[in-house]
Amino acid sequence: MVVNETMLGPLGTAIQNTVGILKVAFGGIFGIYLVLLALRVLEYRRMVSLLKGVKEEISKLNDNLNKKRKKR
C-alpha cells in the first residue's frame, strides 16, 4: 500500500502542531519549576539569616542574665 503525500500532509501538520504545543507546555512547566526553585532558595537564605540574628540575640540575653546573676 502506497501512502500519498496528500493523505500524510494534514496528519503530519496535526502531529507537528501537537508536538509544538507539548513543547511549549512542558517548557513552561519546567520554567515555572525553575522560578519556584529560585524563590525557595531565596526564602531559605532569608530564613537562615533571620535565625542567625535570633541566635545572636538569645546569646546576648544569656550573657546579660549571667552577668546579673554573678552580681548577686
Image (cartoon, rainbow, N blue to C red):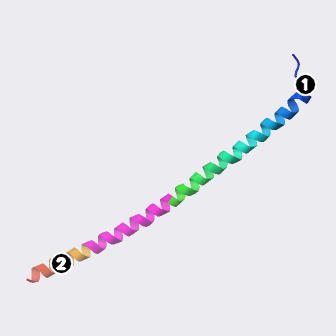
The quadrant in which the C terminus is found is: bottom left
Q: Is residue 3 left or right of residue 70?
A: right
Q: Is residue 3 above or below residue 54?
A: above
Label 2 neighbourhood size at 10 Å, few (<14), some (14-19), many (20+)? Answer: few
Residue 42: percent from the left, percent from the top?
49, 63
Residue furthest left as drawn: 72
* Residue in the foreground of this view, choosing between 52 and 8: 8
Q: Nearer the viewer, mark 1 or mark 2?
A: 1
Q: Please identify the residue farthest to the bottom as the structure is shown.
A: 71
Q: Which residue is mark 2?
A: 65
Secondary structure under the numbered disc 2 in the rendered image:
helix
Majority secondary structure in the magenta region: helix
Q: Residue at x 38, y 69 (%)?
A: 50
Disc 1 element: loop
Look at the image and tell me in which quarter the N terminus lies: top right
- The image quarter in which residue 54 lies: bottom left
* Gap in angstroms between the C-alphas marked 1 and 2: 90 Å
Left or right: residue 27 versus residue 50 is right
Q: Which residue is mark 1?
A: 4
Residue range (magenta): 40-58
